[in-house]
Image (cartoon, rainbow, N blue to C red):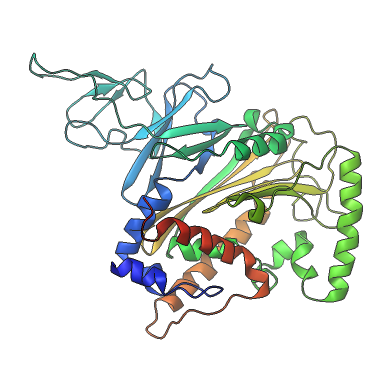
Amino acid sequence: MSAVDEWLAQRRPGWSLPQPLYLSPEVFDRDIERIFMRSWTFVGHVARIPVTGDYFLYEFGDESVVVIRTDEQAEDGAGVAAFFNVCRPRGSRVCLEDEGRAKGRLVCPYHAWTYSLDGQWASARHMPDSFDGRGMDLHRAEVCVVEGLIFVCPRSPAPDVTGLWEHIGATFAPYGFAEAKIAHRTTHRIRANWKIFAENFWECYHCTHTHPEFCQVMSYPAAAESPSRQADYDRFVADWRETAAREGRLPADVSLEDSGLYQIGRTPIRPGFRSQSRDGNPVAPLMGELTSYDGGISSLQMFPLNWIVASSDHAMLFSFAPIGPLETSAELTWIVDGNAVEGRDYDPAEVSWLWEITAAEDWKICEDNQKGVSSRVYQPGPYSQAESGIDLFVDWYLGRVRQGRR
């Protein structure tokens, strides 16, 4: 048994992971191979690549994947491709910038091998007559675009998640995601292992203590603090759900326990709040086909960690990637209705206020958590009753990285 498998076997159910699983380069390499090479991950919105030839890089560990618009006229996501950013003869990076536009073809800056926008080999200089370019295409990754959301699975065959795609369509199509525009986007580097980062986002045990702004907007974190608050919240939710169902705004909820991969559904904000904003008032026009600010959010959370939260007037799209054993990148994108005009219909600072400030607080507590986990005296500790989401995440993680998984 390898050292990694020994560490994995030491995990006590209901407790956090043994220290090496948060620190070891060997564990990180296995995480990349068995989790991130083989999972669907949300990587961006189609509005980031509106024109044929537009691309951006999705990077994790030592890997780099080009996500590119191959045909701006194509519908249903057929005009987006993804392939590894690795030229065939010598392995050079083909695209050197984080984002850009290729005019008609991709040209490797090292030896000038050329490829079509969908990664097919096109030409190479000074090759012998016997050279056959067939089989020299860039290595492909699988890509799926659902309601304007781009998902990538680097290695084929990708998991069959038909149910997930259907639930995303049913939940977010009314918001007009596919035609939305990007109002604001930020990227961050966090000095913490990706599992510490993910664990933080799979529980709200910390919310009332570390996220005052979030608790000012959302009513559910404080409900768990006392039986009377919980009773008040339950009555509020029941009334809100009855109204939402009557208006046709309550698609079926899917729990982590049922799907084993994601949770999706609708949640009210707080009495009197129509949007996830500073004062509860709308910060942008209604999205898509919506006809009212109904005071609720639609959300998707998916293993290992993708998060989409939509108010009636804007949505926050969250993606992340492991960079090294002690470093994680995160990207937050806010979208609004495609016809909204910045400065007239919305202020990016107000649209992004809640999740920008909440995320900054999360970066800090994750880095502080990593410092403690790296201590010589760290030992795994028990999860609380409010951390069932972490327990499900860790079980999912262990099921994919333990000995015997390929």
Looking at the image, which is closer to me, 132 or 207? 132
User: Measuring 26% from the left and 37% from the top, which residue is drawn there?
Assistant: 93
Residue 124, given in percent of the width and then of the height, sits at 18, 20
Above or below for 260 versus 89: below
Direction from residue 216 to residue 44 in the image, left or right = left
Q: Is residue 376 above or below residue 184?
A: below
Relative to 207, say whether 92 is above or below: above
Q: Quadrant of residue 322?
A: bottom left
Task: Give residue 206's quadrant in the image.
Answer: bottom right
Q: Quadrant of the N terminus?
A: bottom left
Above or below — where is 376 with respect to 66? below
Q: Is 202 left, or right, of 176 in this rendering?
A: left
**Residue ranking furthest to the bottom:** 377
Residue 349 location (% of width, % of height): 65, 49
Q: Quadrant of residue 220?
A: bottom right
Image location of residue 352, percent across then percent down = 64, 49
| Relative depth, front residue between 349 and 399 | 399
Q: How many marks?
A: 0
Res. 347 visible in picture? no
Question: Is residue 375 visible to the viewer in this orientation of the structure?
Answer: yes
Q: Name the residue rendered at 54%, 70% in the picture.
A: 365
Left or right of 209? Residue 199 is left
Expressed as whole percent of the image width and height from the top left, the position of residue 32 reads 37, 53
Name the residue furthest top: 129
